[in-house]
Image (cartoon, grey):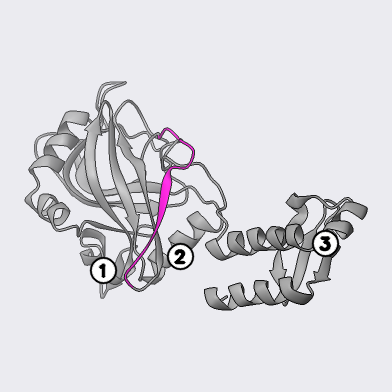
Amino acid sequence: MTMLKSTQTNKYETACFVQEAPTSSELTPGGYTIKKSSEGKPFVKFGSTLWTFDGYNRMHRWYDLQNAKNVVTTDERLQTLKAQNKWRGEWNHPNPEIKGQQYSDIRMTIPEPMRTSHFISNDKFIGNKYKATITTHPSTDCGRAVTSEIIDLGAVPSFSVRLLGIMIPNAPINQPNMRVTKVITFDMVDYPSHADANADIVATVQESANVVFLKELSKYCVEQDETMQVVCESFQISTDEIMGIHNGNIVIEQVDSSKIHIPLKGDIRREALSLIMKRGI
């Protein structure tokens, strides 16, 4: 947080730049959709709570719902960006750069297009929460990285508001002690100020389409090949242990972490390799 100046209305009120984390979010299973760009690059869409207004966060800051709502809904810049699908956020908050003896705040108040990790849309205030749809960027380095974390590693994203405002240290207990003057964006962060600041998704690792295809193809081959059926029956190999096909071999991974590679032969081998080549794997 970077202090900017003191106001004249109250000697304790202080204007500030805040990179705040979001608030609570209800997690629901299967809460994101995997899509592909025109170039075939994956990206994801999901809903998330970005902000809540029902109490203090981990940094003992409390925001007023009506104040935040008025700022967001009357900001011409935000309304234009949303209408043109250009309200972008970054992966982690930008740090101020020192030039000479002064801080340069351009990176802090204007998100950098090439560092975009996601876009924000369909935003709405629901009860004491501010929610929106998040779409990761399919082409930037940051967008591809966060997409991979969500799909491949099962990471649950968290978001943090970047804003200008007024700190009110002498506010009454259990009352808002922050007044927002400008909302810039919501960035993706690892550890948010609010305890439950997570996207509305459950952490799961999704198998790629090719992995699923190879697994299903390997099971089909076992069903069609009499020799493979006998092998699986004799060695009590379950269908869940058949993981895929690699170099013309059925790959089996058993519960003791051992692996078995069994070569396919004859017509079923030719059929399987033909299907794999057509898919371009």
Q: Which residue is mark 3?
A: 226
Q: Amino acid at mark 3?
A: Glu
Label 1: how many Cα within 10 Å (few below 14, some 14–19, many 20+): few
Decide whether residue 277 is among the magenta residues.
no
Of the residues shown, which amino acid type is indicated by label 1? Answer: Pro
Between the residue at mark 3 and the residue at mark 1, the CA separation in whole angstroms equals 57 Å
Image position, residue 201 (x, y; %) = 45, 42
Q: Secondary structure at mark 2?
A: helix
Q: Nearer the viewer, residue 165 or 226?
A: 226
Q: Is residue 32 magenta?
A: yes
Viewer-closest of 89 and 192 = 89
In x, y percent, where is residue 42? 42, 64
Q: Is residue 132 left or right of residue 91?
A: left
- Tell me the quarter of the picture where residue 200 sits: top left
Q: What secondary structure is found at the residue carrying circle 3?
A: helix
Q: In the rendered view, does 168 fall on the left or right side of 181? A: right
Give the residue pinned by disc 1. 113
How far is mark 1 from mark 2, CA to CA?
15 Å
- Residue located farthest toward the top when viewing the structure as drawn: 173
Residue at the image point whose x is 26% and y is 21% from the top: 172
> Considering depth in this image, is 64 or 174 the residue closer to the camera?
64
Magenta stretch bounds: 25-38
From the image, tell me which residue sits under label 2: 145
Label 2 and label 3: CA atoms lie apart by 44 Å
On the image, which quarter does residue 77 sit in?
bottom left
Q: Residue at x 69, y 59 (%)?
A: 220
